[in-house]
Image: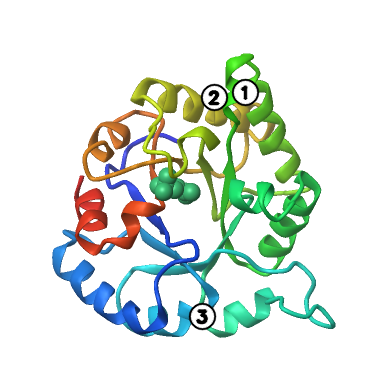
Amino acid sequence: MDKTDKIAIAAGNWKMNMLPSEVSTFFNEYMSKANTLEKTIFCVPYIDIPAAISAVKNTPIEIYAQNFYYEPKGAYTGEVSLDMLKDADVTGVVIGHSERRDIFGETNETINKKVLAAKAAGMKIILCVGESEHTREINAHHAWIEYQVLSALEGITDTKDIIIAYEPIWAIGTGKTASAEDAQDMCKFIDYVLHKYYNSFEAVPILYGGSVNEKNAAELFAQSSIDGGLVGGASLVAEKFAQIRNA
Ligand code: PGA
């Protein structure tokens, strides 16, 4: 995406962390330390949604869900629908995170169904893609990412409100951040793939994710093809995430 607007997108992914009773204290501290509340997203556990929505009321901060089921309603014990999330004022969803692919067996087909359902429901989307260490070692990472992006977006007729997060699996939660050059190379490649197949569509912001922290964020966000970060561990500490926001 062309970087005319220099504010990076800072998206926090709390994963299965943060008690509902901790949410309001977190946001009080975060908001007192962040220089701007623009272009900021928190992807929170379902149970934290009401507290998070209430804490960010009247601010530009957006609350996304980390998951949902793509069917509209019915006998799906344990699942949450897009309509339920919308009714709770959630504006977006994460789809295709490597933890959902690897631990919960989500396939490219499931991910495509989720993308189509979220799009039809008018939900914003952070679509995650990323290669394993082995895929990178055998130098198949570009082809792998191209396949993940294209299969997730199959049937999509516009890319409005879609963000893609490039998250190499070997960098997630490991402290092993991709170098700024490698992250830039892959985000640029995703941009190229999108241009090749969806030339007439709206530009898609591309985030880097994988051990982003308050020390490496500025260098990563300064890369011309990186529009921001999807941040796991460091988004749980208000002060650290504010420093990333301010990078
Ligand atoms: P991490 O997680 O920042 O803890 O590596 C990133 C993610 O999984 O989105």
Query: Would you call the spot at circle 2 few (<14 residues within 10 Å), some (14-19), or many (20 or more)?
Result: some
Q: Nearer the viewer, mark 2 or mark 1?
A: 1
Q: Is residue 153 visible?
A: no
Q: Position of residue 99 (x, y in %)?
A: 60, 50
From what the image shows, is residue 131 above or below residue 83?
A: above
- Name the residue beneath numbered marker 2: 189
Q: With 185 as the anchor, is 83 left or right in this view?
A: right
Q: Earlier in the sequence, mark 1 or mark 3?
A: 3
Mark 2 vs mark 3, CA separation in Å: 36 Å
Name the residue type under label 1: His
Mark 3 C-beta to ligand 1 under 8 Å: no
- Name the residue beneath numbered marker 3: 47
From what the image shows, is residue 67 above or below residue 77?
A: above
Secondary element at tag 1: helix
Give the residue displayed 64% in from the left and 14% down from the top: 138
Q: Earlier in the sequence, mark 2 or mark 1?
A: 1
Mark 1 vs mark 3, CA separation in Å: 36 Å
Secondary element at tag 2: helix
**Labels 1 and 3 touching (C-beta < 8 A):** no
Quadrant (top left/top right/bottom left/bottom right) for the C terminus: top left
Q: Position of residue 51 (x, y in %)?
A: 40, 84
Give the residue displayed 50% in from the left and 26% down from the top: 186
Query: Would you call the spot at circle 3 few (<14 residues within 10 Å), some (14-19), or many (20 or more)?
Result: few
**Labels 2 and 3 touching (C-beta < 8 A):** no
- Name the residue beneath numbered marker 1: 134
Q: Nearer the viewer, mark 1 or mark 3?
A: 1
